[in-house]
Amino acid sequence: MKREDLTEKLLDIKREKGWTWKHIQEEIGGLSPILITAACMGQMKLPKAQARKAAELFGLSAAEERMLNEPPYRGSIPQMPPTDPLIYRFYELVMVYGTTWKELIQEEFGDGIMSAIDFNMTMEREPNNKGDRVKMNLSGKFLPYKYYGNEEGVPDYGFKEP
């Protein structure tokens, strides 16, 4: 079985049982609801305790449970640019604001990147009389580039210099 097959199996069971992601997240527990959903979608791994709970919830085999605990091959968007309108809007945000985010982050922190590995994300519904809004908070650790081959007096990393 491939990981994509397991994802499809989980989605089939979710549909068949009429479960919501909120229900699944509450049953598995122990992690961010977003991370649990990402793991069920094949983009993150579950720690053993959560993989065990997911296996019990979905009625999975021991091999499928182990697969939930394996590091996945990440990157589920089949083509670029993405064609799904909701996913495309995130792509559009990066196309329009990506260089701005880069400039502002590097001006504030130095020469580096925002981690998507050491990362937190929350999502909530924000009521608005003109139509509810999606509020997302992304928080990634700043990772400076290492300056290798540097000589005396040259910093080791690209943190913002005073």
Image (cartoon, helix red, strand yellow):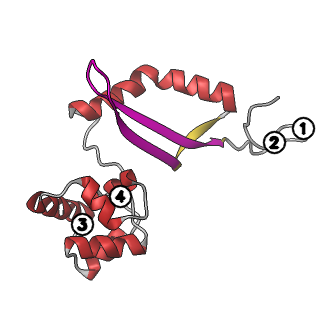
First in sequence: mark 3 vs mark 4: 3
Amino acid type of the residue tagged 1 in the rendering: Gly
- Judged from the image, the secondary structure of the residue bearing numbered disc 4 is helix
Residue 59 location, quadrant:
bottom left
Cα distance, mark 3 to mark 1? Answer: 51 Å
State which mark lies toward you, 1 or 2: 1
Question: Residue 136, position in %: x, y?
Answer: 41, 35
Question: Residue 1, position in %: x, y?
Answer: 21, 71
Q: Which mark is residue 150?
A: 2
Cα distance, mark 3 to mark 2? Answer: 45 Å
Question: Residue 99, position in %: x, y?
Answer: 51, 22
Amino acid type of the residue tagged 3 in the rendering: Lys
Q: Is residue 3 visible?
A: yes
The magenta region covers 119-143
Q: Which mark is residue 153?
A: 1
Residue drawn at 56 percent across, 27 percent down: 102
State which mark lies toward you, 4 or 2: 4
Reading the image, the residue beneath label 4 is 36
- Judged from the image, the secondary structure of the residue bearing numbered disc 3 is loop
Q: Is the residue marked by circle 4 packed among few (<14), some (14-19), or many (20+) residues within 10 Å?
A: many
State which mark lies toward you, 3 or 2: 3
Cα distance, mark 4 to mark 1? Answer: 46 Å
Residue drawn at 74 percent across, 32 percent down: 160
Cα distance, mark 3 to mark 4? Answer: 19 Å
Cα distance, mark 4 to mark 2? Answer: 42 Å
Q: Is residue 108 above or below residue 68?
A: above
